[in-house]
């Protein structure tokens, strides 16, 4: 198995993609708006990917956070509230807000499960600070690390009830960045005690099945390498200090925070300690380059993958998705009515 998660170029597999994927068996795939037309088409696409791999629990990822980060949308799918809405409700009534969050994210995950998507790149556990870039903004569950952790746990609980795996991101924290790592390499000069505050939600949810790194330099830990490419940050901070032993994927290798050929970026991420290299854009030459340069997935990667995907194997039969969603959302709205 190749320790890479690949994007696809369009709504159906091309001949070149099919040949490559059959040959190298990527660990998983990620879908974007360019891959999505309607529910039947998405289901056919995910079924074709599973057919190539022979793995019923194949990781097929998407970014469906709610709010402004949503790959499934109208007219075929409903819109979901941003994370910050639940933080506002939590300030009024923590118990009801958390319960509403579980219902909301379970209902959201049913959309994914119905079309064969098994992994959602959420929740965002970043702790925003005043003056930081707004790339996180309302994607975060407020600014209190304890609240972020509590609502992040609710997200993971809701996902698991629908048989979908969550990915905590962007470890060790994107909330202080002054730039969007899609466009530039941020540097964070905060003191160690401030970075410890940012780590708290990740530490509280260290048992999460998967996590995604941040392409950010944290000068107090490693002033030369961003977290994705830093053996010190991945080993000492993410694995040892935070205690995360789940499947660790890089953020997208194509982001402008990184430099050099895509294959070299992937190799560097794995050498630093990432389990999986994430390559989102579905460019066949880049995927061939990664296939040629990356080593086969090692035993620790495979162990973490099997543990992470266990909820998919154990997922209950949800029956009529639309009916169950309406029941969940009715309960959610009742809990939020006065908040």
Image: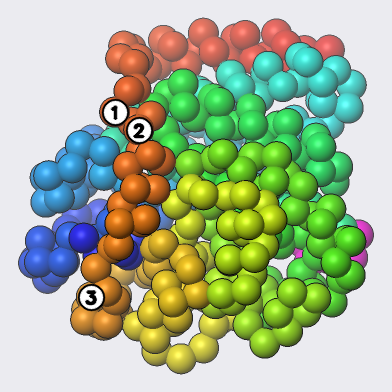
The secondary element bearing badge 2 is classed as helix
Q: Whole-percent x and y of residue 13? A: 17, 58
Q: Taking 80 as reference, is 315 above or below it?
A: above
Q: What is the quadrant of the C terminus in the image?
A: top right
Q: Taking 19 as reference, is 170 above or below it?
A: above
In the displayed structure, does residue 64 sit left or right of residue 204? left
In the displayed structure, does residue 24 sit left or right of residue 119? left
Tag 1: Cα neighbours inside 10 Å, few (<14), some, or many (≥20)?
A: few
Q: CA distance from mark 2 to mark 1?
A: 5 Å
Residue 220 in which image quadrant: bottom right
Is residue 334 visible to us here? yes
Query: CB atoms at circles 2 and 1 under 8 Å apart?
Result: yes
Query: Which residue is more in the foreground, 3 or 88?
Result: 3
Q: Which residues are magenta?
A: 130-134
The secondary element bearing badge 3 is classed as helix
Tag 2: Cα neighbours inside 10 Å, few (<14), some, or many (≥20)?
A: some
Q: Nearer the viewer, mark 3 or mark 2?
A: 2
Q: Which residue is mark 2?
A: 310
The scheme the figure's colours follow is: rainbow
Q: CA distance from mark 1 to mark 3?
A: 28 Å
Q: Whole-percent x and y of residue 274? A: 46, 66
Q: Earlier in the sequence, mark 1 or mark 3?
A: 3
Based on the picture, tell me whether residue 324 belongs to the magenta stretch: no
The numbered disc on residue 291 is 3
The numbered disc on residue 313 is 1
Q: Earlier in the sequence, mark 3 or mark 2?
A: 3
- Look at 39% across and 86% down and name the residue there: 264
């Amino acid at each position: 198995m190749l320790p890479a998660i690949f994007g696809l170029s369009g709504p159906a597999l091309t001949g070149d993609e099919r040949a490559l994927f059959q040959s190298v068996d990527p660990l998983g795939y990620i879908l974007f708006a360019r891959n999505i037309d309607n529910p039947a088409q998405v289901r056919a696409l995910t079924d074709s990917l599973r057919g190539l791999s022979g793995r019923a629990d194949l990781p097929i990822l998407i970014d469906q956070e709610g709010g402004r980060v949503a790959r499934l949308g109208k007219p075929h799918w409903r819109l979901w509230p941003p994370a910050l809405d639940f933080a506002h409700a939590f300030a009024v009534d923590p118990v009801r807000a958390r319960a509403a969050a579980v219902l909301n994210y379970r209902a959201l995950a049913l959309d994914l499960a119905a079309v064969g998507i098994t992994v959602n790149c959420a929740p965002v556990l970043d702790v925003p600070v005043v003056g930081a870039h707004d790339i996180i903004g309302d994607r975060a569950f407020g600014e209190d690390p304890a609240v972020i952790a509590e609502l992040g746990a609710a997200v993971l609980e809701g996902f698991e009830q629908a048989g979908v795996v969550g990915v905590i991101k962007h470890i060790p924290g994107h909330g202080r960045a002054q730039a969007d790592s899609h466009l530039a390499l941020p540097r964070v000069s905060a003191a160690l005690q401030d970075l410890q505050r940012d780590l708290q939600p990740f530490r509280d949810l260290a048992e999460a099945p998967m996590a995604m790194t941040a392409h950010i330099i944290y000068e107090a830990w490693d002033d030369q390498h961003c977290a994705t490419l830093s053996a010190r940050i991945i080993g000492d901070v993410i694995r040892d200090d935070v205690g995360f032993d789940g499947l660790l994927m890089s953020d997208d290798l194509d982001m402008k925070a990184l430099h050099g050929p895509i294959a070299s970026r992937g190799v560097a991420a794995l050498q630093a300690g990432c389990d999986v290299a994430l390559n989102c854009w579905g460019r066949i030459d880049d995927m061939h380059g990664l296939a040629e340069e990356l080593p086969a997935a090692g035993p620790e990667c495979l162990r973490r993958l099997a543990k992470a995907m266990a909820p998919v194997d154990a997922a209950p039969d949800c029956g009529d998705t639309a009916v169950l969603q309406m029941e969940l959302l009715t309960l959610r709205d009742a809990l939020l009515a006065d908040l």
